[in-house]
Structures are given as C-alpha cells and as structure tokens.
Image (tube, rainbow, N blue to C red):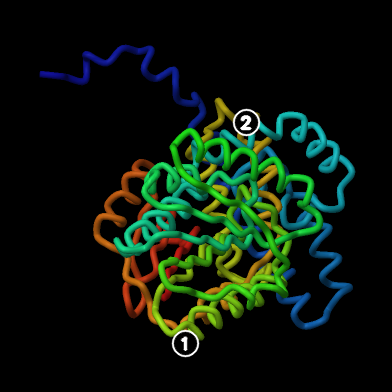
Amino acid sequence: MLSPTDISCDFFDVFPTNSCEHASMINMEFDQELSIRHLLKAYGESIEKGYMDLAQVILTRLRDKASPIGTTMERLSHYLSVQRSDPQAQRLKEECMKNHSMAFRALYEITPYGRFAHFVANYAIYESIPRDIEEVRIVDFDIGDGIQWPPLICALGPRRSVRFTCINDAEKDYKFERVRERLASFAQSMGLNLIVDNLRLDELMRIGASEGVWLVFNCMVGLPHMNMGRRSQVEKFIEGARNSLVSSSTTNGMLICGNGRCGHELFSNEHLLHSQALLESMEWHFPSSFSLARTSMECLFIGPCVSSCLGEHELVSVGSSLEGCRFSKQNLMEAMEIVRGGDYGVKVRGEWGNEMVLEWRGTPLVRVCAWR
C-alpha cells in the first residue's frame, strides 16, 4: 500500500517554493485573460455604435496585450488587432511562408477541421448515388488544391465516369491546370474515367440535371486551410445550385455545404467564442514543445480565419426550396473516429438531421449540411 512516506522529496521540486508567488502569477494570468476579453467586447461595441475615437484607444490597449506566442487570449487579440497592420507581424508571416507547404500539410493531416468537413461531405455524396447512375458530376465552388476528392475517387472506382466542374476564379487560373493534372493522374491510377473542366459563376445555370447523371454541388467555405476570399460569391453559387436542382424534373442531385465560420460579426460574442475555441484546440494539438510549429500554422491559416468573417446565414438559408438529406448513422460514427481525443465532439442537428457539427468543448467549429 502506498503511504505518504513513500513519496520522494524530489517530488516537491516540481512546485514553486513560494506558493504565494505561484498564486500571484496565476492571478495575473487570469486578470490578463479577463482584461483582453473585456477589451475585445468593448472594441466591438464601439465600432457598432460609431465611437471611432474610443475604438482606436481600445485597439491600442489590445495591441499592448497581444502576442502571437502567448496565451489563447493574447493570440486571439493578436490576430484580431495586430496581424494585418503591424510590420513585425508581417515579417513573421513572411518567414512562415517559407514553410507554407509543410505547414499546410501538417494542419490538414493533424487537425480535424478540413478532414472532418471533407469526409462527411464525401460520405454523404457516396451514399446518395443511386445504383443505376452512369455518371457523377460534381460542381465544386472552390476546389483549392483538390485534397477533398482522392478518397471519393477511390470509393467510386472504375464503375462510373466522374466529371468535376470547377468554378473559375481568375486569381487561381494558374493553379487550376496543376490541380486538374493531379486529379486526372490519380483517377487514371484507379482505373477511373475522369473529366475535369471549369466555368464562370454566371454560367452556373447552364448546368442542369439530366437522366443517368447524379449532379452534386459542393460548397466548402471558411475552413482554416482554405483561402478566406470569394465570400461574396457564396450566395450566388448556392442560389444557382438550388435553382438547377429545383428546375429538374427528377430529384437526381444534391447540395453539400461546409462552413468553417460561425458568426458574421467580427467582434460578436459568437465569433470570439468560435475563435477562442479554434485557438484552444490548436494548443491541444501543438502544446508548448511544438510552439514554433503552432505559431507557423496559426500565422498562415488560423489567423486569417480569426480575422475574417463569413456569415452563417449564407449557408443555412439554402433549404427554402430543398429538402434536407439526413446523414446516416454510419457517417456519424466514422466522423467521430476522425476527431477522437481532446475535447472534440460531433453532433447531428437540423430538422431533417441533415447538419453535422464539429465542436470543441461545446463550441461549433465546422458545420456540414446536405440538401436535395
């Protein structure tokens, strides 16, 4: 039986010799966190009410307390008030850009944000395809680096032909050809007949559902690994997708939406809670021993996500003329396997059970919904 005398004196070396000093340090950290929280709220209220002079004074205080390598709230303050304007923050970002590819891969493979959204969407697409369908056509709002699609290509195999139609973005034309070649090469190795083309957003209505073709509209926005631009085009894409599906004489298609933004006002309580949860989860994946890696990924991907807004209203209004497509229990169970560990949770919500949410300590991080 273990007794108090069995404990080595060395055990006590891990504690501060001055307990009052230790308690004082904890209190100082708590006061700092609380002070930043109040300042962020006050700044948002000042902006909302048009008190711009007061807002600038508060912003100066926030910058004094901000740090890209500090506590959660200090990092949150940094990305909300400093990153876009401070020369030192810009130099830090330039240094991080030297390892952009490695940071991108680490973020995607280690954290669940993008993998969760992509898996849930792909699984729902795969389950929805009727057996007699000859061709699957996927219209992707933002294909990015194409990392969502290899698992689905593997699952579909050579039995069906697959066509990807990417919405054209002039700023990403240079990348499209490279992504197209990658997907085509990968599909060929799987024995799959794959076509990859693109069109402009204003040409979306030209796409209509037809016999023997399963039409899928895929819209992933605001995920941390993604570019934060093109927000104004989201609503147009969803409207075009909805019209294409509704105008069809048969229900041979679906719309999948993934959203990594929760709250459309930058300094709203909802946005601050979401950003804090995002930074806390990053700290769990990359504790102090990996602080340099965490700083690099937060600077390149999490920071822009925190300092930009994409209103959730742009995604949840799609069901006005479509019916929710319920996520299967198997999809839910597999998604839960992706996020095992930490304080993550996965829930299915919505009137039709067509919304799956990734949470951190009860705060939504990523939402995926399906309609048909």
- Residue drawn at x 43%, y 73% as measured from the top left: 211
Label 1 is placed on what type of residue? Ser
Above or below, comparing residue 146 to residue 247 in the picture:
above
Image point 46% across, 62% down: which residue? 364
Q: In which quarter of the image is the N terminus?
A: top left
Quadrant of the rendering where the C terminus is positioned:
bottom left
Q: Residue at x 58, y 60 (%)?
A: 140
- Residue matched to label 1: 321
**Is 158 rendered above or below residue 356?**
above
Which of 351 and 322 lies nearest the eye of the viewer?
A: 322
Return the residue nearer the eye: 288 or 229.
229
**Mark 1 falls on what kind of element?**
loop
Q: Which of marks 2 and 1 is nearer the N terminus?
A: 2
Classify residue 186 as left or right of residue 351. right
Mark 2 or mark 1, which is nearer to you?
1
The dot on residue 353 is none
Instruction: Say whether residue 32 is visible.
Output: no
Say how many tags the image has: 2
Under mark 2, the amino acid is Ala
Query: Label 2 belongs to which residue?
Result: 293
Query: In x, y percent, where is residue 153?
Result: 45, 45
